[in-house]
Image (cartoon, helix red, strand yellow):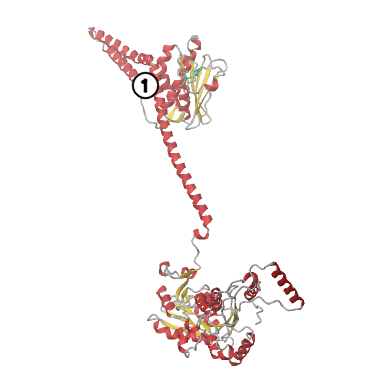
Amino acid sequence: MDETPESPRARLFAEGRRLPASAARVGTPTRGPGEWSQRGPPLLPVAPSTRVVARLASAWVIAALLGVAAPAPAAERVGNVLVLYSYPWRLPINVEGDRGLHEAIRTSAERPVLVCDETLDAPRFGGPAYEAVVVKYLREKYVAKAPDVLVAVGDVALDFLLTRRTLLFPGVPIVYAGVDQKTLQSMPPLPAGVIGVPIDHTYYPTINLAFRWHPRAHRLVAVTGTSEVDRRIEAQLRAELPRVKPGVTVELLAGLPLDEILRRVAGLGQDAVVWTAGVFRDGANQSFVPRDVVAAIAAASTAPVYTSFDTLIGNGTVGGYSPSIYGIGRQAGEIVNDLLDGGAPGTLRLPRPLPQRLVVDWRQARRWEIPENAIPSEAVVKFKPPPLLEAYPNDVLVAVLVALLQTALIGWLVVEHHRRRRAEAVREVQSLELAHASRLAVAGELTASIAHEINQPLGAILSNADAADLILESPNDRRDEIRTILADIRRDDRRASEVVRQWRGLLAKHALEPRAFDLNGVVRDVESLLRAEARRRGVALRIQPAPTPAETVGDPVQIQQALINVVLNAMDAVAGLPDDRRTITVPVECVDGRVTILVRDRGHGIAPADLPRLFEPFFSTKSGGMGLGLAITRTLVESHGGRIWAENGPGEGARFHIELPAVRGHDDAPPEPA
Ligand code: ADP
């Protein structure tokens, strides 16, 4: 038998046969032509002696010299399968079925199979003359490769092979595939050796599904063609119409030119659904590939298009119930395997017919707003975009990680922010406490002056009271003098009260309530608070309020405290100096949107080395000094958005500048120097 391969697949297996039998086939099962047999003992001794090898080698050489072919390695007989399709190759139904068939047929080096495909190309070709040519063609083509199994795909091929079996390949078993049960029932009983799995393909489940998914529709527009196949599909549809949902009106677009079909479906409303299996030939006698027609109908249609052929899904149809064409191909392939393995056609256990299953195009389901939960879970849903995680696992992983990190970072920042806010609040309270403690300490230092400030009016009151007593004992009417004395008493009382009020204002604990206030008022209060102390120390404290209000925003008590600290330091600096140098001048100025209080003394000044450290906590040059006064003062000033700095005066003494933001900008002439 000439086994020149025609297809790559056949070539592969032919190459498989050419493997040296001695190397590859020793002891392996093989089969002779037309039968399956177990291979006999090895051709060569397993461990030949040198002598035997030499003898054999010379035999090969002699044989070669004499031109006698060396004995051919025993080759397995190739199982020939001829698949005859009814319809054109390009039909998706053929492509899909063919895939299943070829994938199922088991072929190997040990049992090579040669599958040859032919088509009758119905309905484009047909008639007795054509069939006669095909018969001749097949007989002559396959004379050297007589098929061991015939596969008839579709009813046209089955009919063809049955009627010409004796003429073509007598006695060769026929496996039919893709032939409907109803068609088989309408045929005479199948002769022996013709087997297959019929398909149970009905259209009404798809049509009823369409009306369930489009409850407003009550009109079925079915599109078919004019070829024999088209007419058979139409006939089946008509036969099934009684099983379509009651109340549906049916409009059959059969025998129309494609243009007219497209025009009709383009004018449909929400009351219609379209069903089609495509068109092989239209009313204008044009032949088509049904899939192309289905795509054109779906593109033109203003109503959803359904089909009962899964190979037509993906071209704009919503979907429908269909047997798996691929599965049908596979089943036929399994039967072919059994026959090639030596099974007798009548004794084979055939697979059960495949049930119809629902196939849905996800994109069309979205387009026609079919709820996701209306699609049964067992449906085969095509073209559904995979979940993000499936489609881009790495990207999703990275995104999730980034999001987690970001969340963790934000969480950490929030926690840190709260912690900082709490720490700030604690620090604020502590600094308020410290400022208050420092005010108390100052007051403690000034107890003698404060006592003097209060005692003085009290003493005056007492003296005035004594004087009044004496006047009352006098026989003369001296009521005017009494009135003057009472006025003095009242004035002294007010003076004492004012001292108490001012110190209480400075020393009382109070919450920070920023408000606008006049620095002129602050320096006046400070002068009043420290007047007695200045007098006690013999220091001339001269304040020079600005001619206009010098307003800033904040807590006046804290600025008072800051100023008291600076003025007391100035008093310390001038202590022990001659009278004329015990002078402190405190002018208030408003310049360029800032208000400043300058504290000028004529003391010993600040050593240049100490200047940078002046405001550091615990820096002091005084014996018994705490070194906290200026540190607290700077904190108070800065918390008001201001600044404080020190310098030595041009001639003598030190100058402390307290600068604060002004509520309104003032530009005053600089005050007189001290
Ligand atoms: P303390 O008064 O307890 O020393 P301060 O913080 O109030 O603490 O002052 C720090 C230091 O600044 C003082 O010890 C002093 O050396 C210096 N100082 C402050 N004011 C003046 C001034 N007017 N003249 C000279 N030195 C000053």
Give coordinates of residue 226: x percent, y percent: 53, 87
- Between 81 and 468, the one nearer to me in the picture: 81
Q: Is residue 449 left or right of residue 33?
A: left
Q: Amino acid at mark 1?
A: Trp
The residue that appears at 39% across and 16% down in the rendered structure is 446
- Between 350 and 380, the one nearer to me in the picture: 350
Q: Classify mark 1: helix, strand or loop.
A: helix
Callout 1: 10 Å neighbours few (<14), some, many (20+)? some
Q: Is residue 115 left or right of residue 363?
A: right
Q: Would you place residue 662 above or below residue 339 in this image?
A: above
Give coordinates of residue 358: x percent, y percent: 45, 73
Give coordinates of residue 352: x percent, y percent: 45, 78
- Between 358 and 470, the one nearer to me in the picture: 358
Q: Answer yes or no: is residue 613 visible.
A: yes
Image label count: 1
Q: Would you place residue 496 above or below residue 509 in this image?
A: above
The residue that appears at 44% across and 11% down in the rendered structure is 538
* Res 10 → quadrant: bottom right
Q: Is residue 380 left or right of residue 476?
A: right
* Residue highlighted by disc 1: 503
Which quarter of the rendered picture does the N terminus lie within?
Answer: bottom right
Kindly give the residue lying farthest to the right in the view shown. Answer: 65
Q: Answer yes or no: is residue 548 visible.
A: no
